[in-house]
Amino acid sequence: MADTLPILLDTDIGTNIDDALALAYLLAQPRCELLGVTTVTGEPQVRAQLADAICRAFGRSDVPVHSGASTPMLVPQMQLDAPQKSVLSRYPHREYFAADAAIDFLRATIRSRPGEITLLSVGPLTNVGLLFAVDPEIPRLLKRHVIMGGVYVSRPAGYGVRERNIMTDPHAAAIVFRANPPGLRCLGLDVTTQCRMPVDECRRRSSHGRLSILREMADVWSRDHPYITFHDPLAAAAVFEPGLCQYQAGLVEVELHSPRLMGYTDFRTEAAAKPHEIAIRVDPDAFFEHYFGTLESVVSSS
């Protein structure tokens, strides 16, 4: 397919259900050439098992999956484990993943296809920050970097001024934003929190055939959460349908000095240089129509 996009996904799958929903979207998206999945934060090897289980449920045992960094660069770990691992006993998956293999895999893959790959980051940015620090040329070899993370324009009701992916490893996030990879585009809580539905509705729409693993992971999530917010699936869908969101250019700086605000993303539209694009609006109805329409192709073929 002429407009196929090569994608690398870096994820903390296994905590919030939305990572699994984003991976499912990429596997179902006919325009996605999924080059690999890397995992990050606490229990990265277990998270790799979850990613591999979803790939296999979708008939994609060919997708490379690699385990990455287990701890942030400097701050204490906030995400110690992957609660959704309880579903693994019921789904085939690869058991063993080498520790800390993600960075070498990302580096080799990006270098093999300079200017072609979109890196989609939907977890803490430890892997990516380390990659950019080890090989400073890598950011320039990307086609685009899309991040789910941060709070930029307005504070969503019920949320603070910081977002978990950024504050879990703020120093890695600062490295990523300072690297200014081409086409750095961020979707923060400002827009992602507008794409929310009851767990029961999502469960109903992902309960058949290859999607059953998503239903079981949603069951784990629903023990403590009545709703699913599609943070990461929106970031994934926006790679292929950029018109789902509107963006504004500016400069993002990550707060590193104040313990109370560490990980705060300061977005300045008046900066002289404006290397970062921030999502400021989303059409939730268009997103859900596109997202579930894409997944329906998997249901119909299973």
Image: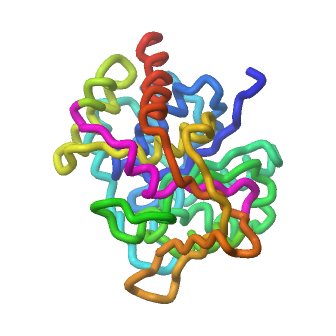
Q: Which residue is found at the position 53% from the left and 57% from the top?
A: 68
Instruction: Give the image quarter of residue 91.
Output: top left
Q: Residue at x 35, y 46 (%)?
A: 229
Q: Is residue 61 visible?
A: yes
Image vertical order of residue 1 relative to residue 151, above or below:
above
- Tell me: 160 left or right of 146: left
Q: Position of residue 192 (x, y in %)?
A: 43, 49
Q: Residue furthest left?
A: 223
Q: Nearer the viewer, residue 245 or 186?
A: 245
**Pick the front one: 161 or 214:** 161
Q: How is the image coloured?
A: rainbow
192 is within the stretch colored magenta: yes
**Residue 33, image quadrant:** top right
Please give left or right for residue 32 compared with residue 117 in the image: left
From which residue to which does the magenta span run?
180-200
Q: Residue at x 41, y 16 (%)?
A: 299
